[in-house]
Image (tube, rainbow, N blue to C red):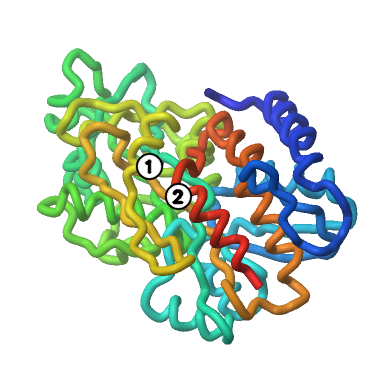
Amino acid sequence: MNITGKARLTAVAIIGALALAACGSDSGSGSSSSASGSGNANCVTGSIKASGSSAQKNAMAEWINAYQTNCSGATIDYQANGSGAGIKDFINKQTAFAGSDSALKDQDKTDADARCSTGPAIDIPMVGGAIVMAYNVSGVAKLILTPDVIAGIYNNTITKWNDPKIAAVNPGVTLPDATIAAFHRSDSSGTTDNFTKFLGTVSASSWTYPHAKDWPAAIKGGQGAKGSDGVASAVKSTANSIGYMELSFAQDAKLSTAWVDNGGGAIEATSQNAASTIASATVTGTGNDLALKIDYTTKTGYPIVLVTYEITCEKGLDAALVPLTKSFLTYTAGDEAQGKLTNLGYVAITGDLLTKVRTAVSSIS
């Protein structure tokens, strides 16, 4: 559903009321007061900074507002500067945790572990989402795309909306003889990493570039925009355009989103359809590191998805940052906070994975 400004304020008010129980006292202890496994936490005073994923920006805004409203003396500053920048900020000890739409790997993992010193940095899945193909094409109420068509649009082999390959999967739809304006992320982005990983997995013959947080430099066409909100704004203001972004931002901008046919029929880009794909993800990390592997080849769920991780130290986080970091992440993993994600255009973490998330958060020290 689309969330208007008024509805978003209502959602914040509801979250705030529900969070009152989650933030029961200004103890500053950061201890869990969970009853019946809800993951709720006591309030803690102090301040922390965090940065990273712009995909989870809207979720973080709701959660921070709720926590701070009901936990006097707590300040949480989250800057949605992109997954790559968020990881760098964490490694450089600028933040208590990073938000990233891709799990730590390679040198980033080594450097993050070094920052934590006495324990590993861990990836904690907290927000799921659909990466949608939002478009602005007059008169096209429903658009179906396949992985090969999406790859063609983004590698510049499909440049017109009435290209026969697009027309073939949209029978009866009048497509304009207009040049496609394709927008991608200009900043280092976990959304880009997941999007290019999807293309490389299911359209390997059409997409020959490695997946990465940075848009492939070899592709000279297309236009860059910063952040998920920047891509949404660019598509909104540009006729005959298309761009990839997390569903929440397409909803906020009231953009149309394409259905994706991954070989089993066209599937609408909804939180519910993305949830089944995320639910089938497998944990590839060890211990409390909950890095996931997503099956982008699914034919039963919406296939282009991401999971945003909160990255922090299992052990070795600066002592002054531990209480509030642990308390806030305990709140975000709670029933009330997770229960609000769908209406905001996200996918909640559920089931056995959510249990593991709560265990991982409880290990922070």
Image quadrant in which you'd find residue 200: bottom left
| Residue located at (66% from left, 69% from top) | 96
Which image quadrant: the C terminus? bottom right
| Residue located at (41% from left, 40% from top) | 130
Looking at the image, residue 239 sits to the left or right of residue 216; the answer is right
- The one nearer the camera, 253 or 365, is 365
Tell me the amino acid under the disc marked 2: Leu
Image quadrant in which you'd find residue 193: bottom left
- Above or below, 250 against 284 in this view is above
- Above or below, 18 against 60 in this view is above
- Above or below, 262 against 31 in this view is above
Sequence-wise first label, 1 or 2? 1
Bin the neighbour count of mark 1 within 10 Å (Cα to Cα): few under 14, some 14-19, many 20 and up.
Answer: some
Q: At numbered mark 2, what does the secondary structure look like: helix, strand or loop?
A: helix
Looking at the image, residue 312 sits to the left or right of residue 104; the answer is right
The circle drawn on residue 184 is none
What residue would you read off at disc 1? 279
Percent from the top left, x then y, of residue 310? 55, 60
Percent from the top left, x then y, of residue 46? 84, 64
| Residue located at (53% from left, 32% from top) | 342
Q: Say if mark 1 contacts mark 2, CB within 8 Å.
A: yes
| Residue located at (52% from left, 55% from top) | 357
- Tell which tag, 1 or 2, sits nearer the viewer: 2
- The one nearer the camera, 146 or 141, is 146
Percent from the top left, x then y, of residue 275? 40, 36
The circle drawn on residue 353 is 2
Can you see residue 43?
yes
Q: At numbered mark 1, what does the secondary structure look like: helix, strand or loop?
A: helix
Can you see residue 55?
no
